[in-house]
Image (cartoon, rainbow, N blue to C red):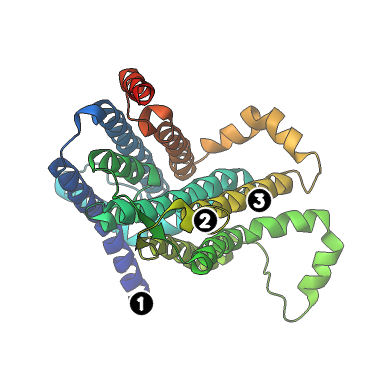
Amino acid sequence: MEDQAATNLIGALIFWLYIVLALVFTSLVLDSLIRLPTPAGRRSQVLVFSSLAFFSFVALSFNMLHVLVYSFKLWTQGHPLPERINVGLALATIWKWSITSTLFKDFGVAIVEDLKRFFWTQAALWVTMSVCLYMGAEGVHRRVPRLWAYFALSQILPISFAQNLFYVALLKLPPAELKTGVMLPRKITAGVVLGYGASLTLAAFPLIWDVLDRVYPITLRKIEAVPWRCVPPRKVEVDSRYLIPTILVARMLLLLPLFLPKLQREASAASYPRGGSDMQVMQKLVTVCAIAMTAGVGCLLRDLDSMWIEFLILEFRWWLLPALWSHPAVTSLGFDFLLSGVSAGAWVSKWVQCGGTPQSFESKREGIKSK
């Protein structure tokens, strides 16, 4: 009992520390952004991405609050609240909930409860890896102040908030020095990406086994009959025993893009190996892995039916969208995935990459013609 109580106490302290650290790192990032001057030609873009960051923070705050309320309601089913409650008793009840509930485990189990939920979960997590790779490489290249704080935020909160704040920093910073680039150790970075994919696959392994058990029941029962079988019967307790360590490994891998990039002097397009820059190659690898996992999840959803693509296209609205609202944890990740995609689309648009307003486009064209 003492060990269990200590474990619960540590979990509660980590939970409250998460909230405090999220506010601290947000303050550090905002302080560094405020200190950077805003170029006159970038004010509209800064306003747009600042608004997206604010919207992201409001959305994730609402969704995370929904997760906490949902967990508290489940907890009160076994711990009835007193009829009369004051402020002191309310705070004591919240503390008791935080040290006796299994919030982190419930969150992890919920996002991989079934393949429909995992469809949104893996999409959000692959976007997180892509953004972390970009923040690491471009942050080193552009010398973003307090780059580590953006990665810290990406560990605590869904990625779109840190992503949009990072875009604001890039818009405020001066252009990168000429003839400089970023070098990534391709083999190590590829190992990080593939290890990340392996962690996501391991998290979904019980779901994969369930599908295989339906499609190939006789073969799998023979495998389960051998003494050294590694697949126990599907239970939440068994799943969560391996799920939390798997999630922790995946989160640690997301930190490595902060340390891998190295600034390279006297770099040029000709100095990059075939296939583009290190960053482009790694982003292609992330894209391939994300597409492969999405295809695999879609195939498993149809019990390995070859017509799964047609099914997903036709039934997406009635089949996968309801899963987005099935649990507040899934809603938080899925909505953040959609918002991150919108932000990335705006970032790569000509409006941002070419400098902003249509007038600036025309002035650039006139300058080229005059030359």
Residue at screen point 28% across, 58% down = 148
Residue 263: x and y in percent read 34, 61
Q: Which residue is mark 2?
A: 282
Which residue is tagged 1? Answer: 3
Please provide percent x and percent y for residue 301. 71, 45
Q: Can residue 203 be seen in the rendering of this structure? A: yes
Tag 3 and tag 1, C-beta contact below 8 Å? no
**Kind of residue at badge 3:** Ala
Q: Residue at x 36, y 51 (%)?
A: 138
Farthest-out residue, right: 218
**Quick one: label 1 or label 2, which is nearer the N terminus?**
1
- The image quadrant that residue 133 belongs to is bottom left
Marks 3 and 2 close (CB-CB < 8 Å): no
Looking at the image, is 84 positioned above or below residue 18?
above
Q: Earlier in the sequence, mark 3 or mark 1?
A: 1
Where's residue 185, x and y in %?
A: 47, 67
Dividing the picture into quadrants, the one containing residue 223 is: bottom right
Look at the numbered disc 1 and give the secondary structure of its residue. Answer: helix
Q: Badge 3 local density, few (<14 within 10 Å), some, or many (20+)?
A: few
| Mark toward the viewer: 3 or 1 | 3
Q: Determine the residue positioned at 63% across, 47% down.
A: 291
**Residue 102 is at least partly visible in this image:** no
Residue found farthest to the bottom: 227
